[in-house]
């Protein structure tokens, strides 16, 4: 089996993370490969789902939402999580939702303008009748921001799953 990504893919992904506006031509020049090679690699990485988006990374704090919190929701058993997920998806301050194991059923990341606004967001989240209980922790500081670059070297060594 071949590695999930090769050296050129890893260098291309690292370059795009470092300089998202580099463009195909700029990437080809900086990587020392043909423009067509870069475009082909990008197309394949997108098709395989390795690259999910070329959208900018927006910082909620700079949009006026400096408070980040993580809420664990317990959902009434036997109902499925779909209705609650649909509910929280309609709340703009909910940035992510993940089904989890453990004492909760759903973990969401939310942002707010300040602590009173966080209370408003939590009240809106728990207003759904299938939410039985919630627990919220406020993020005091981000020590390691969301990142994928350290995975690039590891992914080069990882074998792709058999299909």
Image: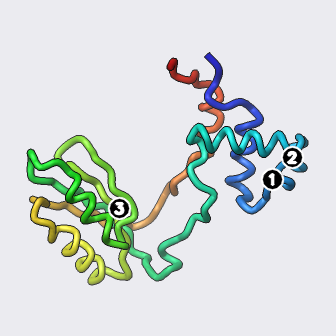
Q: Position of residue 48 (x, y in %)?
A: 59, 37
Specify whether residue 104 is in view. Answer: no
Q: Is residue 36 above or below residue 86?
A: above
Residue 24 placement (x, y as % from top left)? 81, 53
Q: Earlier in the sequence, mark 1 or mark 3?
A: 1
Alpha carbon distance from label 2 to label 3 = 39 Å
19 or 83: nearer the viewer: 83
Residue 8, x across and y down, in percent: 77, 36
Q: Kindly report which numbered mark, 1 or 3, lies closer to the viewer in this rendering.
A: 1
| Residue that numbered label 2 is attached to | 35
Q: Are marks 1 and 2 in contact (CB under 8 Å)?
A: yes
Disc number placed over residue 83 in the picture, else none: none
Residue 86 lies in quadrant:
bottom left
Residue that mark 3 sits on: 109
Q: Which residue is mark 1?
A: 24
Along the viewing direction, whichever of 73 and 139 lies nearer the viewer:
73
Residue at the location (31% across, 59% down)?
108
Q: Residue at x 72, y 37 (%)?
A: 9
Local crowd at mark 1 within 10 Å, few (<14), some, or many (≥20)? some
Secondary structure, mark 2, is helix
Residue 141 in view here:
yes
Q: Residue at x 76, y 40 (%)?
A: 40
Q: On the image, which quarter does residue 44 sit in?
A: top right
The residue shown at (36%, 77%) is 112
Q: Is residue 17 left or right of residue 145?
A: right
- Which colour style is shown? rainbow
Q: CA distance from mark 1 to mark 2?
A: 6 Å
SS under mark 1: helix
């Amino acid at each position: 089996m071949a590695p999930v990504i090769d050296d050129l893919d890893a260098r291309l992904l690292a370059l795009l993370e470092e300089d998202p506006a580099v463009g195909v031509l700029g990437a080809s020049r900086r990587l020392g490969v043909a423009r067509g090679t870069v475009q082909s690699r990008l197309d394949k990485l997108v098709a395989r789902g390795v690259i999910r988006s070329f959208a900018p990374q927006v910082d909620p704090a700079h949009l006026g939402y400096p408070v980040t919190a993580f809420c664990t929701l317990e959902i009434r058993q036997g109902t499925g999580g779909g209705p609650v997920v649909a509910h929280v998806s309609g709340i703009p301050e909910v940035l992510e939702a993940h089904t989890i194991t453990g004492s909760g059923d759903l973990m969401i990341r939310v942002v707010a303008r300040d602590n009173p606004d966080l209370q408003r967001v939590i009240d809106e989240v728990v207003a759904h009748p299938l939410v039985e209980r919630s627990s919220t922790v406020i993020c005091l500081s981000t020590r390691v921001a969301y990142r994928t670059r350290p995975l690039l070297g590891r992914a080069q060594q990882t074998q792709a799953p058999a299909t």
